[in-house]
Amino acid sequence: MAENSLSSRLQMAMRRLTGRGILTEKDIDEMMREVRLSLLEADVNFKVVKQFIANIKEQAVGEKILKGLNPGQQVVKIVHDELKRVMGEDAEGINYASSGITTIMTIGLQGSGKTTAIGKLGVYIRKTEKKNVMFIAADVYRPAAIEQLVTIGKQVGIEVYEEGLKDARDIVTNGLKYAKENKYNCVIIDTAGRLHIDEKMMSELVDVKAIANPNEILLTVDAMTGQDAANIAKSFHEQLNATGAILTKLDGDTRGGAALSIKEVSGIPIKFASSGEHMDTFELFHPERMASRILGMGDVLTLIEKATDAIDEDEAKSMMDKLMSDSFNYNDLLKQFKMIKRMGSMSKILGFMPGMGKIKDAASKIDDKQFDKMSVLITSMTEKERKDPSLIDKSSKRRERVAKGSGMSVQDLNRLRSALDQQKKMMKQMMNMDEKQLDSMSKNPTQAFQKTKQKKGKGKGKGQFRIR
């Protein structure tokens, strides 16, 4: 979400309460005014805002809260739970057919990211459910849509059934027959999109629904359209009875209005969230985790899931053993860079961690291309130098050769040396911690990033590793 987003404003409002031992009704009213403004500026539907504020105030001004221990924290919990309720309480996945083909019909306006979302959904289903997926290209009003889906299908290795610009009803009928004959057990249909909702489009979609008899009708909605997304969802739902929504473009200048308005206004649960262009930037929508992210509490469960997907367990164990035995070298650091890249951007990873909201400005400025530069430096070393970092440390000639070979400066190489050194120091620091300190760090991972006092080095290239 953007810097001036709902997330930033709500976190500021919550911080004013959490440090206080006593709260009055006046304090709650002041916070409610700030929350109301935050929601309205985030383009959340007015009726949703009104109900949201009423529900929080009803619970927050109770005697149990105002006179209880840590009243500020209790109010934050009430706001968190209300955010979760508005977005749908629990995560909802795909309702798969118990046997035969699971058919998913996707609907949405042009520009909502529908075709890209289909590609991501196909990759997600194949990966999580191990199903044999096929796409049907039935958006026949925009020639580029068929071409785009075919391109995405080739990119992710999923077959696309297409007949060009023919009648969508015939394409879907023939496509489903083809899927059955070729033993596909999950079919995703790309349907007509328009710049706006019209009668002709809806009539065709109703016919396609009757032919396909889908297990799911998923509506793609652009998160950047705010509460308009909820109104669009309501129009589609009234005529097609959609079963869920895919919230797309969640990584852009998102104000939060769509996520908080769709379920309440249209009745359609948000099932998935999509961000970025890469085909793996697609995840099950967890209302509770999204509420935690909005309030700056982090999202450790999603971080763990991403890490589990990206990092091989044996590889991670080997790396940990090397760190603990002080034999961690440049080859290991290169593997670490690759692991981080597989998990996504560094700023996004930090965003999942509790307490990292405080250094959001710094996180947003992290340039992930620095990992590529550091990788080039490592590959410019000899195999002996990668395995034994002391060779680089002891020889200025080696440093000059590596820097020149990578097209970078010795200062860049010194930052890489510092990065390796920092990893070793952090591990030693953790090994010397007692159980209480480790427990404290698990609750606030930012402690691992706090710098210990060091003597200032002289000359160039003695500073800390900076990613800029």
Image: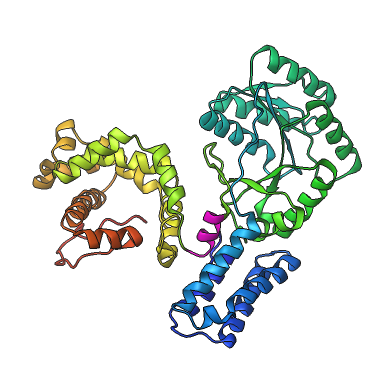
The answer to which image quadrant residue 178 occupies is top right
Q: Is residue 66 above or below residue 198?
A: below
Q: Residue at x 16, y 62 (%)?
A: 459
Query: In the depicted view, which residue is nearer to us: 242 or 162?
Result: 242
Q: In the displayed structure, does residue 364 sit left or right of residue 186?
A: left
**Residue 366 placement (x, y as % from top left):** 40, 55
**Residue 2 placement (x, y as % from top left):** 56, 61
The quadrant of the rendering that contains the N terminus is: bottom right
Q: Which residues are magenta?
A: 288-296
**Residue 166 placement (x, y as % from top left):** 83, 23
Query: In the depicted view, which residue is nearer to us: 168 or 217?
Result: 217
The answer to which image quadrant residue 33 occupies is bottom right
- Report if residue 436 lies within the magenta region: no
Answer whether residue 196 is visible to the viewer in this image: no
**Residue 168 placement (x, y as % from top left):** 82, 26
What predominant SS class does the magenta segment belong to? helix
Colour scheme in use:
rainbow
Q: In the displayed structure, does residue 467 sit left or right of residue 300?
A: left
The quadrant of the rendering that contains the C terminus is: bottom left
The answer to which image quadrant residue 149 occupies is top right
Answer whether residue 432 is visible to the viewer in this image: yes
